Image (tube, coloured by chain):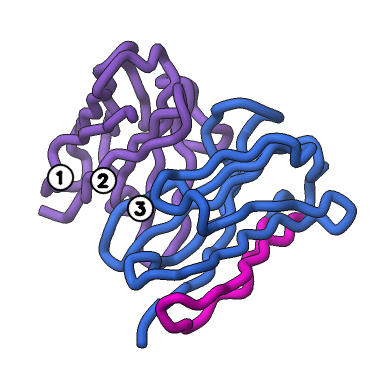
Chain colours: A purple, B blue
Amino acid sequence: DIQMTQSPSSLSASVGDRVTITCRASRSISSWLAWYQQKPGKAPKLLIYEASTLESGVPSRFSGSGSGTEFTLTISSLQPDDFATYYCQQYDTYWTFGQGTKVEVK
Amino acid sequence: EAQLLESGGGLVQPGGSLRLSCEASGFSFSRFSMNWVRQAPGKGLEWVAYILGSGSTKYYADSVKGRFFISRDNAKNVVTLQSNSLRVEDTAVYYCARNYDSSGFKAFDIWGQGTVVTVSS
């Protein structure tokens, strides 16, 4: 099984901050990685797939990078709507999610 | 607009069964693979099951293999998760989610709002 490890588990940030979340895979997954945003009581929302492709309608302040085993999600300038929990997901072999990163107000 | 709507959740005793349904609308249902994903209270996301658009291929997470069964009716635009021998640890919100492409391992681009399953005596 492929394990996904996100860091940090939580972070505190202010509006306008640049935020970076890291996701590591237990073995190479090429670029088969997605990022999701989830708000309390809501379903996850796809932000990025194939490591760096922005889903239609997602603001350009979100970006993804990486390949192999190490990936990052960057929010270039944090907005009030971005406070949420973010999950990475590998889909190289079946599907596995990271444990999540909660982005909180500083 | 593509939408998914789950139903069938509820309270069930350990060892019991539930049948969850997900009705799709706004897209050509039979062209897309579908999944069930769950989220235990206060926990992260766990993929549960997958079914190909034709229904000919199915995959399950080890945690549910042999107890849960996924199926679909393309004439009715419905995907179903039959959950048997339920355990307390199956308590979760269950989401239906669409693969963004027709087959294989892909990300999930459309999600339902979820249905709550509580397993408790």
* Total numbered labels: 3
**Residue A13 can be seen, yes or no:** no
Q: Which residue is mark 3?
A: A81
Q: Earlier in the sequence, mark 3 or mark 1?
A: 1
Is residue B104 toward the left or the right of residue A45 in the image?
Answer: right
Quick one: label 3, few (<14), some, or many (20+) residues within 10 Å? few
Q: Amino acid at mark 3?
A: Asp
Of the numbered discs 2 and 1, the one sitting upstream in the chain is: 1
Circles 2, 1 touching at the beta carbon (< 8 Å): yes
Front tag of 3 and 1: 1
Q: Which residue is mark 2?
A: A100
- Magenta residue span: B4-24
> Alpha carbon of mark 2 to alpha carbon of mark 3: how far?
17 Å
User: B84 and A19: which one is in front?
Assistant: B84
- Residue at point 47%, 82% (across, down): B12
Q: Which mark is residue A9?
A: 1
**Residue A104 sits in quarter:** bottom left
- Disc 3 versus disc 1: distance between alpha carbons? 19 Å
The spot of residue A58 in percent (x, y) is: 49, 37
The residue shown at (51%, 58%) is B67
- Whichever of callouts 2 and 3 sits on the residue coming sooner in the sequence is 3
